Image (cartoon, coloured by chain):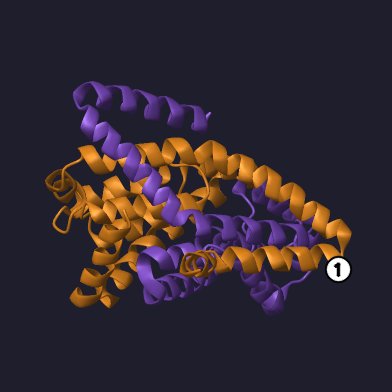
Chain colours: A orange, B purple
């Protein structure tokens, strides 16, 4: 009984979403059908991307020593860490929700919060394939200008977020992440 | 293409790891499964939420909402729609290009595009899971404000 309760609690967001989806389907069968089709293609896409990503995360977790990560992306990694975080985030493809588990492993290996925020920002905005696509669709001048503005914004936001988090909060977040992975 | 590279990397990684240490490889797979299991509830919830949002806000709805409106109202609506929706860039950019052709403003369209990429209301539950509520909310609000600046700058310069 307790077991079922904890499962329901863990999956409550999912359950609520299913209920909303059903209500949408009753309210408008056309929209319901459409959402089912999107669900199907999204779940297929997820099933394709997730196995290799999580295996790579597992391997990274087991083989990369903390000291190495700290050296390259830790608190005192400076410009090297910043550039590495940008390159990692920008060379990725795939939806943003894949970036969070990767960020989790980076934090577990003690990459700095600043660099991890940069990584998330780069993943969301400065991806290379997306940039090339933007150039062909909206022009090089537009794409370059937006890229420049975005990079500056990401650095400022990451800096601010890093300053807002105090030592205690960072410790707490890291502890939670260590337990999770 | 990207997925293929991922699979090749994962398979070679596993083979290499297996020859170096069977125990560690087993541990890596265990960890992969554990972190996936931990995230599964959020994953599934977000997937359904994306489907609901995408089916209600399809390309036609989005273009009718942001395409014709101009001025400050159009700006705000573009930002809100961009924050809520999660359409891939490969769909968004041609859409924006076509809206620009029929007269939509650069400022509004850039607000939509930047908010779309930087602000993630749909993925909030997952972000909170790793970074906690405080950082997640501040990050998304800060990204929304940054999108405003980016849109204003580009609207002026282009």
Of the pair A3 and B126, the residue shown nearer to us = A3
Q: Where's residue A10, x and y in %?
A: 49, 66
Residue B137 visible in the current orientation: yes
Q: Where's residue A96, x and y in %?
A: 49, 53
Query: Residue drawn at (51%, 32%), measured in percent from left and top?
Result: B3
Query: Residue drawn at (39%, 52%), measured in percent from left and top?
Result: A101
Query: Residue drawn at (34%, 60%), measured in percent from left and top?
Result: A117
Q: Where's residue B131, x and y in %?
A: 36, 67
Residue B64 visible in the current orientation: no
Quarter occupied by residue B105: bottom right
Quarter occupied by residue A169: bottom left
Of the pair A36 and A77, the residue shown nearer to us = A36
The residue where tag 1 is placed is A27
Q: State left or right for residue A156 relative to residue A175.
A: right
- Label 1 element class: helix
Q: Where's residue A8, x and y in %?
A: 54, 67
The image shows residue A101, relative to residue B138, as above or below, that is above
The image shows residue B66, relative to residue B7, as above or below, that is below
Query: Residue drawn at (47%, 68%), measured in percent from left and top?
Result: A6
Of the pair B141 and A151, the residue shown nearer to us = B141
The image shows residue A44, relative to residue B132, as above or below, that is above
């Amino acid at each position: 009984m307790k077991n079922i309760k904890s499962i329901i609690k863990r999956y409550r967001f999912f359950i609520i979403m299913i209920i909303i989806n059903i209500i949408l389907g009753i309210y408008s069968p056309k929209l319901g059908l459409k959402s089912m089709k999107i669900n199907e293609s999204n779940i297929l896409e997820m099933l394709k991307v997730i196995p290799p990503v999580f295996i790579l995360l597992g391997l990274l977790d087991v083989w990369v020593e903390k000291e190495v990560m700290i050296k390259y992306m830790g608190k005192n990694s400076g410009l090297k860490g910043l550039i590495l975080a940008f390159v990692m985030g920008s060379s990725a493809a795939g939806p943003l929700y894949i970036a969070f588990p990767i960020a989790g492993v980076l934090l577990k290996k003690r990459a700095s919060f600043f660099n991890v925020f940069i990584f998330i920002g780069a993943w969301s905005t400065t991806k290379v394939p997306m940039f090339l696509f933007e150039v062909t669709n909206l022009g090089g001048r537009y794409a370059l200008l937006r890229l420049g503005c975005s990079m500056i914004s990401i650095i400022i936001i990451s800096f601010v977020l890093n300053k807002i988090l105090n030592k205690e909060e960072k410790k707490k977040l890291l502890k939670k992440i260590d337990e999770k992975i | 293409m990207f997925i293929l590279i991922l699979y090749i990397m994962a398979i070679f990684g596993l083979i290499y790891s297996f020859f170096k240490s069977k125990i560690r490889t087993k541990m890596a797979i265990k960890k992969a499964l554990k972190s996936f299991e931990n995230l599964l509830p959020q994953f599934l919830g977000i997937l359904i939420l994306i489907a609901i949002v995408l089916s209600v806000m399809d390309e036609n709805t989005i273009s009718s909402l942001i395409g014709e409106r101009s001025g400050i109202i159009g700006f705000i609506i573009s930002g809100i729609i961009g924050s809520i929706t999660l359409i891939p860039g490969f769909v968004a950019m041609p859409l924006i290009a076509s809206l620009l052709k029929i007269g939509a403003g650069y400022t509004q369209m850039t607000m939509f595009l930047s908010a779309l990429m930087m602000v993630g209301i749909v993925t909030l539950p997952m972000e909170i899971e790793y970074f906690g509520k405080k950082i997640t909310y501040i990050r998304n609000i800060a990204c929304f404000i940054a999108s405003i600046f980016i849109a204003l700058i580009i609207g002026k310069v282009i």
